[in-house]
Amino acid sequence: MAPTADETRRQIEGLRHEVTEILNELEARGRRAANIPGTLRGRVADSARRTAETNPLALALLGLAVVLAFVGLLFRIRRRAQARRRPVAVLRRRARAAAEDLSDYWERARGSLPINVQVRAGTGEPGVQGGYEEPSMVKKLLWMGLTSALMAVAGLVARRLSSAIWQGAMRENPPTAKV
């Protein structure tokens, strides 16, 4: 801000003048840029017209290529439609839809599983305590099952491997009866 109103007014007018000059320059550049494609389009149209006049066979071949491309596109669309109507494709779509529905149903059902269902003392009716099942308990059970299965498989593999090493080194069966 200038110290006096007159100086402030002059600064504002100077800024307006600069902004107007910048906008005029941008507008001129935009018109020049927009004019280039128009000129180029005119050149291409003139060249195409001259080619068509001097060589009508090229125009006929171009037209034939466009028609063949269109016919090929139609055949492709028809073939895809037929493929969609085949029993295998219909069953595949239905199976995917059923799997998605089952997945949604499973997610809703899993979210509503109670933690602890017990018979209430005195009434003999089942009741829910503790709200909903904690996911960490299910994860713990899955982890225990996975580790125990992998340890059993590792034990079997280790026993077979050690038996093979024993037989290779000693040229006799291992001392245990079952391997």
Image (cartoon, rainbow, N blue to C red):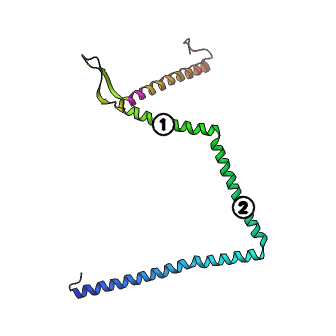
Tell me the tag on residue 67.
2
- Please state if 163 lies on the left or on the right of 106 as rendered: right
Residue 148's spot in the image, x, y percent? Answer: 45, 24
- In whole angstroms, how far apart are the C-alphas of marks 2 and 1? 45 Å
SS at mark 2 in the image: helix
* Circle 2 crowding by C-alpha within 10 Å: few under 14, some 14–19, many from 20: few
Amino acid type for the residue under numbered disc 2: Val
Q: Is residue 2 above or below residue 179?
A: below
Residue 114's spot in the image, x, y percent? Answer: 34, 28
Front residue (pair 145, 41):
41
The quarter of the displayed image where residue 117 is located: top left
Which residue is pictured at 73% across the width and 62% down the height? Answer: 65
> Which residue, given by chain and number where applicable, does mark 1 sit on?
101
- Please state if 62 lies on the left or on the right of 141 as rendered: right
Which residue is pictured at 67% across the width and 55% down the height? Answer: 73
The quarter of the displayed image where residue 176 is located: top right
- Please state if 45 lies on the left or on the right of 60 as rendered: left
Residue 122's spot in the image, x, y percent? Answer: 24, 16
Give the overall secondary structure of the magenta segment: helix
Front residue (pair 75, 147):
75
Instruction: Return the disc, 2 or 1, that comes first in the chain's sequence.
Output: 2
**Quadrant into which the N terminus falls:** bottom left
Q: Is label 2 in contact with label 1 (beta carbons under 8 Å)?
A: no
Q: Is residue 9 above or below residue 69?
A: below
Amino acid type for the residue under numbered disc 1: Asp
Which residues make up the magenta segment? 138-144
SS at mark 1 in the image: helix
Which residue is pictured at 28% across the width and 17% down the height? Answer: 124
Give the residue at the far top of this rendering.
177
The quarter of the displayed image where residue 134 is located: top left
